[in-house]
Image (cartoon, grey):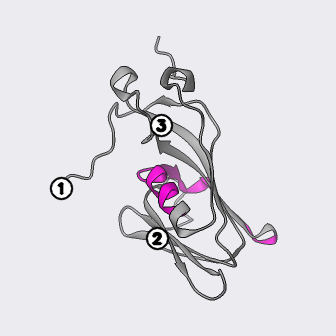
Amino acid sequence: MTQDASFDDGREAPINLGAFDEEDLKIVSSLVQDAVFPITEMSWRNSERRFAILLNRFRWEDDGQQRHGAERVQSLLVVDNVLKIASQGVDRQEKDMVLSILSVEFTPSDEGAGQIELTLAGDGAIRLEVEALELTLKDVTRPYRAPSGKAPSHDA
């Protein structure tokens, strides 16, 4: 029987970060690169102006990969102050679709407002028009061994 890894194994704590400017967002973007999620794990709550995704995030920050192997962890990526959502290459009717995040970027407009774009593998994208940049990333489970057993690679 294999046992899931724990944060104690890596001597690291779960991530709980906020992004309120473009520099913060660069850090979050690097941590969610190659995160995968079923399309059914996206949630848009218009009345709360909140968009959230339950991700299976690769633990890029994990220094213990040589000791215990590659790991993923479930994390919540939450964007607040969302006014409008648009997507490209994302068919919400295809319930079995699994998406993968490549990057998260912010394009400012007037007085703190702007657009957050989640670029997805396979030419997909989700664009969130926001009143202000306010995004959080929080690990919500213990780490588990990555099913592939290795880190994602972008070699051609």
Residue drawn at x 53%, y 69% as measured from the top left: 22
Q: Give the residues drawn in magenta, as a range.
A: 25-47
Kind of residue sitting beneath label 3: Arg
Residue 96 position (above or below residue 118):
above
Q: Is residue 32 magenta?
A: yes
Residue drawn at x 45%, y 40% as measured from the top left: 61
The reply to whether discs 2 and 1 touch (Cβ–Cβ < 8 Å) is no
Residue 19: x, y in percent? 61, 61
**CA–CA distance in space, label 1 to label 3:** 23 Å
Task: Say if residue 43 shows up in the picture.
Answer: no
Q: Residue furthest left?
A: 156
Which residue position holds label 3?
A: 72
Task: Work out whether mark 2 precedes mark 1 in sequence or the reverse, and give the earlier one.
Answer: 2
Residue 79 position (above or below residue 15):
below
Q: Residue furthest bottom?
A: 110
Crowd tier of the residue under label 2, counting other residues whose Cα lies within 10 Å: few below 14, some 14–19, many 20 or above: many
Task: Say if residue 107 shows up in the picture.
Answer: yes
Which residue position holds label 2?
A: 125
Q: Residue furthest right?
A: 47
Q: Secondary structure at mark 1?
A: loop
Q: Of tags 2 and 3, which is closer to the observer?
A: 3
Which residue position holds label 1?
A: 156
Q: Nearer the viewer, residue 6 or 91?
A: 6
Mark identifier at residue 145: none
Residue 26: x, y in percent? 47, 61
Crowd tier of the residue under label 1, counting other residues whose Cα lies within 10 Å: few below 14, some 14–19, many 20 or above: few
Q: Secondary structure at mark 2?
A: strand
Name which quarter of the figure residue 68 lies in: top left
Residue 32: x, y in percent? 48, 52
Q: Nearer the viewer, residue 34 or 90?
A: 34
Q: Is residue 42 magenta?
A: yes
**CA–CA distance in space, label 2 to label 1:** 21 Å
